[in-house]
Image: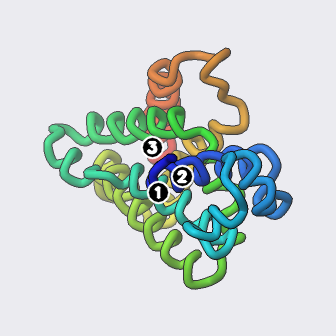
Amino acid sequence: MPNKNTQKSNIKQAATKLFAENGYLETNLWNIASASKISKGGIYHHYLKKEDILFDILNDFLDQLLGNIELELKNIEGNQAKLEYIISRHILISADHMNKAKVLVRHSYCLPSKKFQIIAKKEKKYYQIVYDVISEFLGKGISKEKLTAITFSLWGICNWTYVWYDPQKALAPENVAEIFKKVFIDGAKKAVT
Protein backbone atom coordinates (compact mmCIF):
# COMPACT_ATOMS: atom_id res chain seq x y z
CA MET A 1 0.00 0.00 0.00
CA PRO A 2 1.47 3.40 -0.96
CA ASN A 3 2.46 5.70 1.88
CA LYS A 4 0.74 9.01 2.56
CA ASN A 5 3.48 11.12 0.95
CA THR A 6 3.37 9.04 -2.23
CA GLN A 7 -0.42 9.35 -2.39
CA LYS A 8 -0.28 13.10 -1.88
CA SER A 9 2.41 13.42 -4.53
CA ASN A 10 0.31 11.35 -6.97
CA ILE A 11 -2.71 13.56 -6.33
CA LYS A 12 -0.71 16.74 -6.94
CA GLN A 13 0.92 15.33 -10.06
CA ALA A 14 -2.40 14.21 -11.54
CA ALA A 15 -4.12 17.47 -10.62
CA THR A 16 -1.29 19.57 -12.07
CA LYS A 17 -1.58 17.76 -15.40
CA LEU A 18 -5.37 18.07 -15.45
CA PHE A 19 -5.36 21.75 -14.46
CA ALA A 20 -2.75 22.51 -17.13
CA GLU A 21 -4.49 20.56 -19.90
CA ASN A 22 -8.18 21.06 -19.11
CA GLY A 23 -8.27 24.05 -16.76
CA TYR A 24 -8.82 24.34 -13.04
CA LEU A 25 -12.52 25.14 -13.27
CA GLU A 26 -13.15 22.30 -15.71
CA THR A 27 -11.46 19.70 -13.48
CA ASN A 28 -13.31 18.09 -10.59
CA LEU A 29 -12.21 15.83 -7.74
CA TRP A 30 -13.55 12.75 -9.57
CA ASN A 31 -11.20 13.54 -12.47
CA ILE A 32 -8.29 13.89 -10.08
CA ALA A 33 -9.20 10.69 -8.22
CA SER A 34 -9.39 8.75 -11.47
CA ALA A 35 -6.11 10.16 -12.84
CA SER A 36 -4.25 9.58 -9.57
CA LYS A 37 -5.76 6.10 -9.11
CA ILE A 38 -6.85 7.07 -5.61
CA SER A 39 -10.43 6.99 -4.36
CA LYS A 40 -12.23 10.27 -3.87
CA GLY A 41 -12.27 9.40 -0.16
CA GLY A 42 -8.50 8.95 -0.37
CA ILE A 43 -8.20 12.45 -1.78
CA TYR A 44 -10.27 13.83 1.11
CA HIS A 45 -7.76 12.23 3.46
CA HIS A 46 -5.18 14.70 2.09
CA TYR A 47 -7.25 17.62 0.79
CA LEU A 48 -10.64 18.93 1.86
CA LYS A 49 -11.19 20.98 -1.31
CA LYS A 50 -9.91 21.23 -4.85
CA GLU A 51 -8.59 24.72 -4.04
CA ASP A 52 -6.30 23.14 -1.41
CA ILE A 53 -4.69 21.04 -4.14
CA LEU A 54 -4.24 24.10 -6.37
CA PHE A 55 -2.71 26.04 -3.49
CA ASP A 56 -0.31 23.19 -2.69
CA ILE A 57 0.82 22.95 -6.33
CA LEU A 58 1.43 26.70 -6.66
CA ASN A 59 3.05 27.01 -3.25
CA ASP A 60 5.46 24.16 -4.04
CA PHE A 61 6.35 25.64 -7.43
CA LEU A 62 7.05 29.09 -6.00
CA ASP A 63 9.15 27.53 -3.26
CA GLN A 64 11.19 25.88 -6.03
CA LEU A 65 11.56 29.19 -7.87
CA LEU A 66 12.59 31.01 -4.72
CA GLY A 67 14.70 28.19 -3.31
CA ASN A 68 18.02 29.64 -2.15
CA ILE A 69 18.15 32.19 -4.94
CA GLU A 70 19.23 35.09 -2.72
CA LEU A 71 22.16 33.11 -1.34
CA GLU A 72 23.03 31.80 -4.80
CA LEU A 73 23.10 35.34 -6.20
CA LYS A 74 25.42 36.50 -3.42
CA ASN A 75 27.96 33.94 -4.63
CA ILE A 76 27.92 35.29 -8.20
CA GLU A 77 30.16 38.17 -9.17
CA GLY A 78 29.03 40.75 -11.69
CA ASN A 79 25.58 42.15 -12.37
CA GLN A 80 25.28 40.65 -15.86
CA ALA A 81 26.31 37.22 -14.56
CA LYS A 82 23.58 37.46 -11.90
CA LEU A 83 20.98 38.37 -14.49
CA GLU A 84 22.08 35.55 -16.79
CA TYR A 85 21.89 33.15 -13.85
CA ILE A 86 18.32 34.20 -13.02
CA ILE A 87 17.20 33.70 -16.62
CA SER A 88 18.87 30.28 -16.94
CA ARG A 89 17.63 29.13 -13.56
CA HIS A 90 14.04 30.20 -14.27
CA ILE A 91 13.96 28.49 -17.68
CA LEU A 92 15.48 25.25 -16.35
CA ILE A 93 13.05 25.05 -13.42
CA SER A 94 10.08 25.91 -15.65
CA ALA A 95 11.12 23.36 -18.29
CA ASP A 96 11.24 20.66 -15.60
CA HIS A 97 7.85 21.75 -14.25
CA MET A 98 6.06 23.08 -17.34
CA ASN A 99 2.58 22.16 -16.13
CA LYS A 100 3.14 23.87 -12.78
CA ALA A 101 4.38 27.00 -14.57
CA LYS A 102 1.26 26.98 -16.75
CA VAL A 103 -1.04 26.49 -13.76
CA LEU A 104 0.62 29.38 -11.92
CA VAL A 105 0.20 31.81 -14.80
CA ARG A 106 -3.32 30.72 -15.76
CA HIS A 107 -5.09 29.60 -12.60
CA SER A 108 -3.73 31.28 -9.47
CA TYR A 109 -6.65 33.72 -9.62
CA CYS A 110 -8.98 30.77 -8.85
CA LEU A 111 -7.72 30.63 -5.28
CA PRO A 112 -9.77 32.23 -2.50
CA SER A 113 -8.42 35.56 -1.29
CA LYS A 114 -6.37 34.38 1.71
CA LYS A 115 -4.60 31.64 -0.23
CA PHE A 116 -4.16 33.88 -3.26
CA GLN A 117 -2.46 36.48 -1.04
CA ILE A 118 0.09 33.89 0.14
CA ILE A 119 0.91 32.99 -3.48
CA ALA A 120 0.96 36.66 -4.52
CA LYS A 121 3.37 37.47 -1.67
CA LYS A 122 5.80 34.80 -2.88
CA GLU A 123 5.46 36.01 -6.47
CA LYS A 124 6.15 39.56 -5.29
CA LYS A 125 9.25 38.43 -3.42
CA TYR A 126 10.54 36.66 -6.53
CA TYR A 127 9.68 39.68 -8.69
CA GLN A 128 11.56 41.98 -6.26
CA ILE A 129 14.67 39.82 -6.43
CA VAL A 130 14.61 39.96 -10.24
CA TYR A 131 13.81 43.70 -10.19
CA ASP A 132 16.79 44.40 -7.91
CA VAL A 133 19.18 42.40 -10.11
CA ILE A 134 17.96 44.19 -13.26
CA SER A 135 18.27 47.53 -11.47
CA GLU A 136 21.88 46.78 -10.50
CA PHE A 137 22.61 45.58 -14.04
CA LEU A 138 21.21 48.71 -15.73
CA GLY A 139 22.68 51.12 -13.19
CA LYS A 140 21.47 54.38 -11.76
CA GLY A 141 19.39 56.92 -13.59
CA ILE A 142 16.65 54.64 -14.87
CA SER A 143 13.14 55.58 -13.77
CA LYS A 144 11.16 53.22 -11.56
CA GLU A 145 8.44 53.04 -14.22
CA LYS A 146 10.88 52.00 -16.94
CA LEU A 147 12.56 49.49 -14.64
CA THR A 148 9.16 48.00 -13.79
CA ALA A 149 8.32 47.65 -17.50
CA ILE A 150 11.67 46.00 -18.22
CA THR A 151 11.28 43.59 -15.29
CA PHE A 152 7.79 42.59 -16.37
CA SER A 153 9.15 42.08 -19.89
CA LEU A 154 11.53 39.45 -18.54
CA TRP A 155 8.74 37.98 -16.43
CA GLY A 156 6.63 37.66 -19.58
CA ILE A 157 9.40 36.18 -21.71
CA CYS A 158 10.16 33.50 -19.13
CA ASN A 159 6.64 32.74 -17.90
CA TRP A 160 4.93 32.41 -21.28
CA THR A 161 7.36 29.78 -22.50
CA TYR A 162 4.74 27.16 -21.59
CA VAL A 163 2.61 28.35 -24.54
CA TRP A 164 5.05 27.16 -27.19
CA TYR A 165 7.83 25.18 -25.58
CA ASP A 166 7.81 21.40 -25.82
CA PRO A 167 10.95 19.85 -24.33
CA GLN A 168 10.40 16.72 -26.47
CA LYS A 169 10.47 18.63 -29.78
CA ALA A 170 12.09 22.02 -29.29
CA LEU A 171 15.49 23.26 -28.28
CA ALA A 172 17.07 22.07 -25.05
CA PRO A 173 16.19 24.32 -22.10
CA GLU A 174 19.80 25.50 -21.95
CA ASN A 175 19.55 26.69 -25.56
CA VAL A 176 16.30 28.52 -24.86
CA ALA A 177 17.95 30.19 -21.86
CA GLU A 178 20.88 31.33 -24.02
CA ILE A 179 18.52 32.87 -26.57
CA PHE A 180 16.48 34.59 -23.86
CA LYS A 181 19.63 35.95 -22.20
CA LYS A 182 20.88 37.48 -25.43
CA VAL A 183 17.52 38.92 -26.47
CA PHE A 184 16.68 40.29 -23.04
CA ILE A 185 20.09 41.64 -22.04
CA ASP A 186 20.71 43.33 -25.40
CA GLY A 187 17.14 44.66 -25.43
CA ALA A 188 17.28 45.95 -21.86
CA LYS A 189 20.52 47.83 -22.59
CA LYS A 190 18.95 49.46 -25.66
CA ALA A 191 15.79 50.36 -23.74
CA VAL A 192 17.73 52.63 -21.39
CA THR A 193 20.00 54.36 -23.90
Tell me the amino acid under the disc marked 2.
Gln
Closer to the chain start, of discs 3 and 1, is 1
- Residue bearing the label numbered 1: 4
- Asked whether the viewer can see residue 30, the reply is yes
- Residue bearing the label numbered 2: 7
Disc marking residue 193: 3
Kindly indicate whether the residue at mark 2 contacts the one at mark 1 (C-beta within 8 angstroms).
yes
Foreground pick, 68 / 29: 29
| Image coords of residue 98 (percent x, y) | 59, 39
Q: Name the residue rendered at 64%, 70% in the picture.
A: 44
172 lies left or right of 85: right
Kindly indicate whether the residue at mark 2 contacts the one at mark 3 (C-beta within 8 angstroms).
no
- In front of the other: label 3 or label 2? 2
Tell me the amino acid under the disc marked 1.
Lys
Q: Name the residue at the bottom extreme.
A: 114
| Image coords of residue 29 (percent x, y) | 76, 62
Dot 3: few (<14), some (14–19), or many (≥20) neighbours within 10 Å? Answer: few
Q: Secondary structure at mark 1?
A: helix
